[in-house]
Amino acid sequence: MNNRLLSLILLSVIISTSSAQKIEWKYSTPNKYWETEKNIKWADKSETGSEIVRISNEKAQYIDGLGGTFNELGWDALCTLPEEKKDKILHDLFSPEESNYSYCRMPIGASDFAMNFYSLNDVADDFDMINFSIDRDRHILMRYIKEAQKIHPGLKIWASPWCPPAWMKTNDHYASNFDDSPVNKNGLPREKVLELPTTGFKMQPGYLNAYALYFTKFVQAYEKEGIKIEAINVQNEPCSNHKFPSCNWRSEDLAYFIGRFLGPKFEKENIQTEIFFGTINRDNPQYTKTALDDPEASKYIKGAGFQWDGKGAIPTINKEYPQLKMMHTEAECGNGSNDWGAAEHTWWQMSHYLRNGARVFTYWNMVLDHTGTSPWGWKQNSLITVNTETGDVTYNPEFYLMKHLCHYIVPGAYRLQTPDNQENILAFENPDGKITVMIVNRENQEKNISLSLKGKYLNLKVSPKSFNTLSI
């Protein structure tokens, strides 16, 4: 054998070995999580009878980041654990080597998973915000966020209020609806329930100016503490009356506040935090379009955020307002089942929102105790469950679902176009050129899939009921 032929053979072996090493395949099933599938090889043609999935190099939307939500009850559950266990959970959520959460949500004041009602200024008619304070957050939410930032220094934060200070609402209460449980936990009388579709905010100049100042002080106070707020969605679920902290707004009134008070205030104070119209939970696109078409508000609205019933509006808004940044703001929380079915439902949300232009996907509670229950009595899912009585920690199927995407996708990636009829496939290209493909098999039988990319094929046998991620 001459030297030239030997060199060509060796080069072929090196290229083949290098190509094999570049492919990583992680899978999870109801009985196995985050396992590695080996012996994946490129082929020149697809296998007969397999479903062909073509990954194009056509880029769709830019990805700002993926993550979950910081809440008081999550931090409270974490603090019941020994330091070593708490640190491991935080590492598994935020470390770039693990779940790699890069863009997370926080509430401004109380959410429905806060320990109780509160805002950053509960002194009635303090229009100059003299009593504005983030002292409570320093001991709870901010500690949670700062621990995450230690692990992932590049972590970005966006924020939204569930409710303005109660004294800014027409019913002078954090809740908007009557609690019909035997104990009436929120204390709101039936006579003070807000009427939909009216606005629950006091639409008077003193309150509107004060609320714009409230947002400004929040952003500035957090920035002084080393936490930059990238964006705010101005109201959580403005289309619903809840028995927990909430405030309904007519679209015209929310646009009026943004266009004539909040936007100009941010501009005057040189606040760089972006203003999003959200978090919208109405499926009728007209609710969102009314604000986006307002000439004053539209100057300041950089994006729109959607959750729950908002899933019905995002396809239209994404198509008709291509200049806007789209955001998924809250995964639907279920009722505490924490099972594989809940994870499949969250996958459907991921696919729907990301295929319709969302640049952010935000899970709801990252951590809850073993009851999973809010102060208002709603038992919900979480990525991780902490049994505060025994100290046991459980990583639920949705934790692994999120990891299948978040571990590989970094801010600055682009979603790649995939066929419209293949909703169980998502593909992305990271800034370094690495391709990530996520495949979900929701069926009860194995599927043969031929992944077509750049003229080659990966012939895959995908397990029934599985989440799969390939990094190429």
Image (tube, helix red, strand yellow):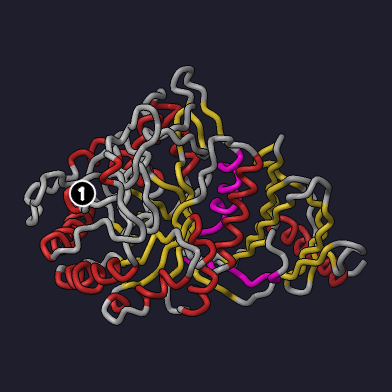
Q: Quadrant of the N terminus?
A: bottom right
Q: Position of residue 58 (x, y in %)?
A: 62, 77
Quadrant where the C terminus is found in the figure: bottom right
Choose between 420 and 7: the one closer to the eye.
420
Question: Relative to 431, does residue 92 appear above or below in the rendering?
Answer: above
Disc 1 is placed on an element classified as: loop
The total number of labels drawn is: 1
The residue closer to the viewer here, 220 or 165, is 165
Q: Residue 415 at what x, y percent from top left? A: 58, 68
**Toward the viewer: 248 or 37?**
248
In percent of the image, x 82 and y 53: which residue is there?
Answer: 447
- Image location (x, y in percent) of residue 174: 26, 44
The picture quadrant where one finds residue 186 is: top left
Please give left or right for residue 128 compared with residue 21 in the image.
left
Image: magenta residue range: 397-420
Q: Is residue 341 left or right of residue 394?
A: right
Residue plotted at (27% across, 56% down): 200
**Left or right, 230 with reference to 133:** right
